[in-house]
Image (tube, grey):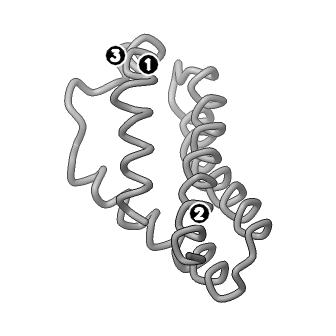
Amino acid sequence: MLVIFLAIDMLWLGVLSKNLYKEQMGSLKAKKPKWSAAILFYAIYIFGLYILVIHPAVVDMSGLSTWWKGFVFGLTAYATYDLTNLAVIKNWPVKITFIDLLWGSTVTTLTTISVLYIFAR
């Protein structure tokens, strides 16, 4: 599950949106990521995704349920981050908020569906 999520997220962060965050966030963006914080995020996120979405989906083998629960989990988690930033950080880009909400929903949905497919085989 972690490998799938990281592969998709690294494709997004390292290739597809490489310059987007730099352009939109300007001086708010760190030159180098704080890897300890990134690793902690991935660990907590994947743990929550497993407990709340993946495990119940594997038990029930419910594809449709997995799709929408993964989508809602991703939307909720990314909205917590981005909407809080929008509320309290001066000059936080609205465009990034909307892109991140879409991305969080997408990467989480793709991960949940992929994992369920692997377990169903």
Say whether disc 2 or disc 3 marks the residue closer to the N-terminus.
Answer: 3
Who's the residue at 59% across and 63% down the image? Answer: 112
The CA span between labels 2 and 3 is 34 Å
- Circles 2 and 1 in contact, beta carbons < 8 Å: no
Where residue 28 appears, as percent x and y from the top left, is: 37, 23
Where residue 10 appears, as percent x and y from the top left, is: 36, 39
Q: How many marks?
A: 3
Density class for disc 2 (Cα within 10 Å; few <14, some 14-19, many ≥20) is many
Q: Label 1 is placed on what type of residue? A: Met
Density class for disc 3 (Cα within 10 Å; few <14, some 14-19, many ≥20) is few
Indicate left or right for 68 with 102 as reference. right
Disc 1, SS: helix
Say above or below: 54 vs 6. Answer: below
The residue labelled by disc 1 is: 25
Where residue 45 appears, as percent x and y from the top left, is: 46, 63
The CA span between labels 1 and 3 is 6 Å
Q: Nearer the viewer, residue 86 or 57?
A: 57
Residue at the limit of the structure toward the front, as seen here = 121
- Circles 1 and 3 in contact, beta carbons < 8 Å: yes
Q: Label 2 is placed on what type of residue? A: Thr
The residue labelled by disc 2 is: 112
Q: Label 3 is placed on what type of residue? A: Ser
Q: Nearer the viewer, residue 69 or 28?
A: 69
Q: Quadrant of residue 47?
A: bottom left
Q: Quadrant of the C terminus?
A: bottom right
Q: Quadrant of residue 15?
A: top left
Where residue 56 appears, as percent x and y from the top left, is: 65, 83
Who's the residue at 54% across and 57% down the image? Answer: 111
Residue at the limit of the structure toward the bottom, as seen here = 59
The residue labelled by disc 3 is: 27
